[in-house]
């Protein structure tokens, strides 16, 4: 299955979160399956938080950020009855607002699961509920408002 981010036009390949053309970035890949989006990522040990063995909060927020905008694009496409990979110029979303709740420490050295569920699509505005899991424990939850870029942006 093609990742949502792999459907973006080449000009977005530099994205720190997901760009395949950014060797210093995460190169995150998100997938929409049965109404839920998922991505898996293991942060390097350099993303240590202040407490030894815990992942830095900003890293967690950035995973939710990139996965959330990819989710918004996939959910909006699905609502319009067309898959991401079927479009020459699929919709692109940026984060207008991202709220993160840190529920439990996120352990380092563990593969993290990031999930997204659609809350609503309202014109160019898509709201996504996000969560980040480690070893089946919910470490963070979030809510994003993503806005679709206008044509030509
Ligand atoms: C393309 C590759 C993207 C990769 C994504 C990776 C994830 C990211 O890191 S994105 C980077 C961080 N985000 C940004 O830099 C975005 C900066 N902000 C902007 O560019 C603009 O404010 C933008 C595009 C979000 C909205 O601007 P614009 O297109 O002019 O829309 P605008 O008319 O102001 O707002 C549209 C609607 O959204 C609402 N809205 C906009 N911002 C917010 C907000 N922060 N909170 C609540 N509502 C908002 C407006 O009220 C409006 O609602 P309605 O249609 O009901 O009146």
Image: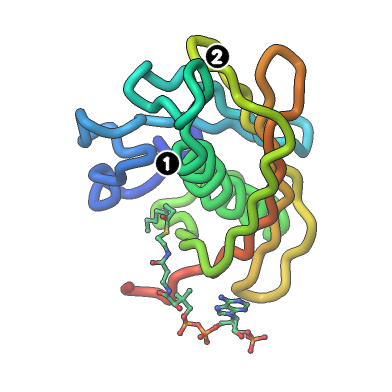
The C terminus lies in quadrant: bottom left
* Residue beneath the point at 45% across and 37% down: 59
- Figure quadrant of residue 131: top right
* Residue beneath the point at 66% across and 36% down: 37
* Residue beneath the point at 40% across and 52% down: 88
The x and y percentages for residue 17 are 38, 40
Q: Which residue is mark 1?
A: 7
Does residue 110 appear in this view?
yes
| Residue furthest out toward the front | 51
* Residue beneath the point at 44% across and 70% down: 149
Q: Nearer the viewer, residue 9 or 51?
A: 51
Q: Left or right: where does residue 52 sit relative to residue 125?
A: left
Does residue 85 appear in this view?
no
- Residue 62 sits above or below residue 80 on the image: above
Residues at marks 1 and 2, CA–CA distance in whole angstroms: 24 Å
> What is the number of the mark on residue 114?
none
Q: Is mark 2 within 8 Å of ligand 1?
A: no
Q: Which residue is mark 2?
A: 111
The x and y percentages for residue 79 are 72, 57
- Figure quadrant of residue 140: top right
Helix, strand or loop at mark 2 = loop
Q: Nearer the viewer, residue 6 or 86?
A: 6
The x and y percentages for residue 145 are 63, 65
How packed is label 2: few (under 14 Cα within 10 Å), some, or many (20 or more)? Answer: some
Q: Left or right: where does residue 91 sit relative to residue 128?
A: left
Pointers 1 and 2 in contact (C-beta within 8 Å) = no
How packed is label 1: few (under 14 Cα within 10 Å), some, or many (20 or more)? Answer: some
- Residue 107 sits above or below residue 86 on the image: above
- Residue 31 sits above or below residue 73 on the image: above
Q: Earlier in the sequence, mark 1 or mark 2?
A: 1
The x and y percentages for residue 130 are 69, 44
């Amino acid at each position: 299955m093609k990742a949502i981010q792999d459907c973006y036009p080449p000009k977005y390949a530099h994205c720190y979160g997901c760009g395949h053309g950014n060797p210093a970035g995460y190169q995150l890949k998100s997938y929409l399956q049965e109404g839920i989006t998922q991505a898996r990522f293991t942060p390097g040990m350099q993303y240590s938080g202040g407490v030894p063995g815990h992942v830095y909060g900003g890293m967690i927020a950035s995973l939710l950020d990139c996965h959330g905008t990819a989710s918004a694009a996939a959910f909006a496409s699905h609502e319009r009855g067309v898959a991401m990979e079927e479009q020459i110029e699929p919709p692109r979303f940026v984060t207008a607002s991202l709220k993160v709740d840190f529920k439990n420490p996120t352990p380092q050295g563990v593969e993290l699961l990031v999930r997204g569920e659609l809350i609503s699509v309202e014109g160019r505005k898509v709201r996504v509920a996000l969560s980040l899991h480690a070893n089946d424990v919910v470490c963070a939850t979030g809510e994003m408002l993503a806005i679709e870029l206008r044509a030509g942006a």
